[in-house]
Image (spheres, helix red, strand yellow):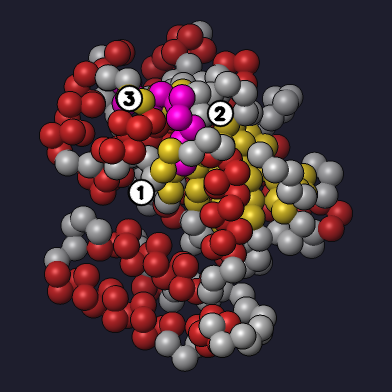
Amino acid sequence: MASWPLLSLRTGMRTRPLSYCQVLSRYSSTSLSPPRVETTFNDAGTIAHVQLNRPDKRNALDLSMFHAIRDAANALKTESLQNKKLRAVILSGKGKAFCTGLDIGSMMNLNVMQTSKELLQKPNDAVANLAQDVAYIWRDLPVPVICSLHGMCFGGGMQIALGADMRYASPDCKLAIMEAKWGLIPDMTATVTLRELVRIDIAKELTMTGRILSAQEAMEYGLVTRVVDDPLQEAQNMAELIVQQSADAVAATKRMYQRTWVSATERECLKAETVEQTKLMASWNQMVKAASNFGWSLPYRKRKDAPSDDKES
C-alpha cells in the first residue's frame, strides 16, 4: 500500500480538542498491550483507519477484542456526530489475515456461561448485543465503512466484514460463514447483512456447510465488492474519492439504502427517496458539488445529521 500520512491516537492527541481526546480515550479502555484495535487518521482527520491488532492469533476474536472493536466504532460514531470532520472509515486486519473468527480456545479458558451472557445479553434499549455490535455498529456510522480483506475472513470475521458498506478482497483471500463447524449459527447480524447481498438458498448453503469460498466466488455471490491485488490501497483510493463528494449526499445515500433495500414497501422506498432528496436540494453542499462540474472550487460545510425523529430506531 502506498504510504499516506496518518495521525496516531497515541501520538497525535495534542492536535485535537480536549473533548475529542476524551472521546478517543475509550480506544485504550483495556489495559492490554498492544491494544486489540488501533485507529489512525489522515492529516485532515477525514479518513480513519481501524486495524484489528492481534496478528499472532490471526485477529481471532477473544472477549477483549469484542469490547475493543465496539469501543473503537462507538468513539468514531461520537466523533463523527460531534466534530463532523470524519468522512470515511477503512477497516482492516494486521498480519496474515483479516479475522479468523471466534477464538474458541480463549473462550474455553473463561467461564463459558458468564462469557456467553456477556456476549449475548443486551440492554433493554439496545438494538444489538455485544457479539452483534461489532458488526452492526459499522452500519450505524453516518459515514461509509470500507473493509480490506486478505488471508482469511472466517466466521465472526466474515460477519464483521459484511457490516461494512464495501469490501475489497485480495485474490488469495478465503472466506467462510464457518459457525457450522462448531455446531452454531451466525448470530452476529448475518440475518440483516446476508439478505441484502445474496439469495436465500445461497445463504442457507453457505451457513449449513461452512464451505470455504475463494475471493472470486465470494464476489460472484455478492459478498465481496471487488477482488483486487492490493485491497488496502483500493480502500484508501475509494475513501479519498468519497471525501471529494458532498458529505450530506453520502450520508443520505447510506441511510436511504439501508432503510429501503430489503424490507420496505415500494411506497416506503419512494418516500425515502423524496425525503432525502428534499433535504439535499439547494443545500450548500449540494450546490458546491454541482458547481465543481463547471470548474468552481468552493469549500464544503460540515455534514448535516438527520433530524432525531428521522433516524432509525
Residue that carries the numbered disc 3 in the rendered image: 213
In the rendered image, residue 308, in percent from the top left (x then y), is placed at: 43, 72
Side of 25 where 173 appears, left or right? left
| The stretch drawn in magenta includes residue 175 | yes
Q: Which residues are magenta?
A: 168-179
Amino acid at the residue labelled 1: Val
Residue visible at 56% across and 37% down in the picture? 230
Q: Quadrant of the N terminus?
A: top right
Camera-nearest residue between 248 and 189? 248
Q: Secondary structure at mark 3?
A: strand
Tell me where residue 134 appears, x and y as whole percent.
Answer: 46, 38
Query: Mark 2 packing: few (<14 Cα in 10 Å), some, or many (20+)?
Result: many
Q: Which mark is residue 98?
A: none
Q: For numbered disc 2, what is the local secondary structure?
A: helix
User: Relative to 178, is 12 on the left or the right?
Assistant: right
Mark 1 lies on residue: 127
Q: Tags 2 and 1 in contact by the CB under 8 Å rule? A: no
Q: Amino acid at mark 2?
A: Met
Q: Nearer the viewer, mark 3 or mark 2?
A: 3
Q: Mark number for residue 65?
A: 2
Residue type indicated by callout 3:
Leu
Given the current orientation, which residue lies at the most extreme right position? 14
Q: Classify mark 1: residues with Cα within 10 Å, few (<14), some (14-19) or many (20+).
A: few
